[in-house]
Image: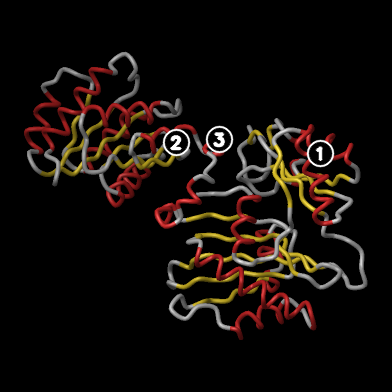
Amino acid sequence: MNLHEYQGKEILSSFGVRVQRGIVATTPEQAVEAAKEMNDKTGTNWWVVKAQIHAGGRGKGGGVKLAKTLDEVKEKASEIIGMNLITPQTSQKGKKVHQVFIAEDMYYPGEAEIEEFYISMLLDRVKGKNVIIYSTEGGMDIETVAEKTPSLIFSEEIDPSAGLQNFQARKIAFNLGLSGESFKNMVKFVSALYNAYIKSDATLFEINPVLKTSDNQIAAVDAKVTIDNNSLFRHPDYVKLRDIREEDPIEVQAGEAGLNFVKLEGNVGCMVNGAGLAMATMDIIKLSGGDPANFLDVGGTADAERVEKAFRIILADDRVQAILVNIFGGIVRCDRVAQGILDAYKNMRDFIKVPIIVRLQGTNAEVAKKMIDESGLKVISAITLEDAAREVTKALS
């Protein structure tokens, strides 16, 4: 589950991580009131107006602006709220901005030099360890830094059973070129950040930039936070942070129907039962000359109602030129699945305009194939994966 910047900062702050403070606003008038409140709380006389969407690179699209007066706060908020913000991480349509974060200005003058760093935390699934990736080149596209100056990217592997050790936090601060008070504060910051990462059941923390202020404080100026959906039963307070306006409407609809669905960019829809079978089915589609339009797992049941919902979700994508149904009948018998497919097809006869190829294997597979072949409907049955692939190729030609 992706979070907005202000939500991520709330979580970080709850674990003692210093963050750039701010208040969220949904209207220009609220933005002005938020700016006044931030002035009272922090003494800030300048404010940063930040669009709140689930995408990075907001500044490049005009979604982050500095305001030096309350009139400018209102003006900048008016420009950002309601805009379709296009960033390197959005589609060409962009994402509509519903709210802005009115944040304190932390780039205040002082004796020491202001510096920006990059720090992220995630799981290395191959090694089975958490990893902290960090760089002195904060405030920049980390992908560009990695491509052009990979020597400026550091990583620190953390054994989950042991946790972050003090020497590792000190090593990170040292590699970032810090000393004195800022060194000590970075050690505290990294330790608190890792603690927040573990205890919030996050799959990703990305802080870009981490700021060393002119008085040697260390703070998260931005916060990209992703929480593991499977852990939400442990964090009921996090569930309400979900913003479905930021998600694909079709994926939201599929979730409400109890279907595991991920939209892709291809032209062949696929419906399966089981994640492993889904991966194999997508491989078959690729080998047939097509591209998967989705990942859709109907789970252990495939009755008419469930199949119909799945068909409607797949066909909502006008790029779909064919649908491949690949079901293994173990717990659920193939003849029942076939009946569900046929009933769903009849209910949607006028809606379905593309070929449907059905491969059913397992209990009563032969009975199921006979049912489909004798139905008189435009449903193509297949026995082997090779047969299914051949039918997909025909459908796309």
Q: List x then y, in percent, for residue 136.
A: 74, 70
Q: Residue at x 18, y 31 (%)?
A: 381
- In the image, residue 151 sits, relative to residue 49, either above or below, namely below
Left or right: residue 48 versus residue 253 is right
Residue indicated by mark 2: 252
Residue indicated by mark 1: 32
Q: Along the polypeptide, which appears first: circle 3 or circle 1?
A: 1
Res 397 visible: no
Circle 1 SS class: helix
Tell which tag, 3 or 1, sits nearer the viewer. Answer: 1
Q: Amino acid at mark 3?
A: Arg
Left or right: residue 230 versus residue 154 is left
The quarter in which the C terminus is drawn is top left
Circle 2 SS class: helix
Circle 3 SS class: helix
The residues bearing labels 2 and 1 have C-alpha atoms spaced at a distance of 34 Å
Q: Along the polypeptide, which appears first: circle 2 or circle 3?
A: 3
Crowding near the residue tagged with mark 3, few <14, some 14–19, many ≥20 C-alpha atoms within 10 Å:
some
Crowding near the residue tagged with mark 2, few <14, some 14–19, many ≥20 C-alpha atoms within 10 Å:
some
Tag 3 near tag 1, CB within 8 Å:
no
The residues bearing labels 2 and 3 have C-alpha atoms spaced at a distance of 9 Å
Q: Residue at x 69, y 35 (%)?
A: 26
Residue indicated by mark 3: 245
Q: List x then y, in percent, for residue 301.
A: 21, 39
Q: List x then y, in percent, for residue 128.
A: 43, 72
Res 57 visible: yes
Q: Amino acid at mark 2?
A: Val
Q: Residue at x 38, y 31 (%)?
A: 314
* Rendering quarter of residue 357: top left
